[in-house]
Image (cartoon, rainbow, N blue to C red):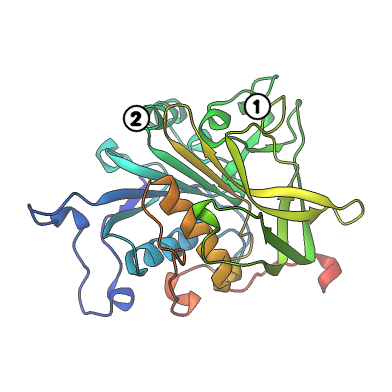
Amino acid sequence: MFRCSLLFVIAVFAGGGACQALAADTAADQPPRKKIVFIAGPCPHSPGSHEAEAGARVLKYCLDHAAGLPPLQTIVCSGWPADDDTLRGAAAMVFTGDLFPPEVAPGREHAMAALGDLMSKGCGIVCLHYAMGLKADTVADDGSHPLLDWLGGYYAANCKHHKSSGGFFEKVEYLPVPGKHPILRGWKAFSFQGESYWNIYFGKNGSTAAVVPIATCMLPPEEPKPQVVAWAFERKDGGRGVGLSPPHYFREWRIDDLRTMVLNGIAWAAKIELPAAGVQCKLPELGTFQPKSVEPTWLPPKWK
């Protein structure tokens, strides 16, 4: 049985002695709060890597505490929720985990159908790191998959039609793409020691005008060229998608600019007006969010 955290945050996050009630308790004369649902999929990586649930809790905390945002209803689920009411009316679905969570969920057909219904109503979608990943056995030979229609692109893991790439580097630098897209607000180039993806699959004809690059990396090192590692996508149905390659290591959440980029993406996907300075929020110690480990327990042998 999957468990859903329907409370804002435990007392150490909220600064009080009791858990706060759901934002559904909004006063009658106030507009309803937008709902953002985090789905943390299976995550068999070693402690300190991926940390799907703890990463979702970090983002929930930031959205609940960031200045300049309207009050929101944020929900973190471990796996696909048993109760479809949890998803009803969601403004955005945010996925973390190893591979696209609905594809690897028990009851996959139900999960994909429920998500498809949300997407048809204009719900936004955000996929972080390997949660944008699809394997060959879940993708048609021509590369088609609902995630491509919803997100604008995906990480093709050893697929027949395309092979995306990933690698670990002593320094990965994310560069904002010049422009005026709201997701670009309030953050600058940042770097970290870790993993990044490249050669994302954006369709058989490559990227379209509906896909707006947000950040690039110069990869691979032996033949560097700008690779899109974060993007925004406007669907024909009016919905929005955001793909974000980081973070692999949980410690990367300490990077203010990385967090703002990700938080901006979630707010934009949910059609929330972003502050001029982007979505900013300081964090308590990362251990507060109960990862298996803050620091990675596995590093590439070349770093040791």
Which residue shows up at 9% across the image and 57% down it?
Answer: 27
Residue 201, above or below 294: above
Q: Give how far across and how far down residue 218 sits, in percent.
A: 80, 55
Above or below: residue 78 compared with residue 149:
below
Left or right, residue 223 beside residue 52: right
Q: Residue at x 53, y 68 (%)?
A: 292
Which residue, given by chain and number where applicable, does mark 1 sit on? 137
- The amino acid on which the numbered mark 1 sits, given as a three-letter code, is Asp
* On screen, residue 92 above or below 275: above
Asked whether residue 293 appears in the rendered view, the answer is no
178 left or right, relative to 283:
right
As rendered, which of 255 and 54 lies closer to the eye? 255
How many neighbours does mark 2 have within 10 angstroms: few (below 14), some (14-19), or many (20 or more)? some
The quadrant where residue 163 appears: top right
Q: Is 72 left, or right, of 213 in this rendering?
A: left
Q: Circles 1 and 2: CB distance less than 8 Å?
A: no
Residue 65's image quarter? bottom left
Q: Residue furthest left?
A: 28
Task: Report, in whole angstroms, how far the alpha carbon at label 1 lies from the one at label 2.
Answer: 28 Å
Q: Secondary structure at mark 2?
A: loop
- Residue occupied by mark 2: 121
Residue 279 picture location, percent across and down = 44, 64
Identify the residue shown where x is 44% and y is 76%: 282
Q: Nearer the viewer, mark 1 or mark 2?
A: 2
Q: Using a 10 Å C-alpha cutoff, classify the residue at mark 1 as few (fewer than 14 neighbours), some (14 to 19) or many (20 or more).
A: few
State the image coordinates of residue 29 (x, y, percent, origin top left).
Answer: 8, 53
Along the line of sight, which residue is nearer the eye, 205 or 285?
205
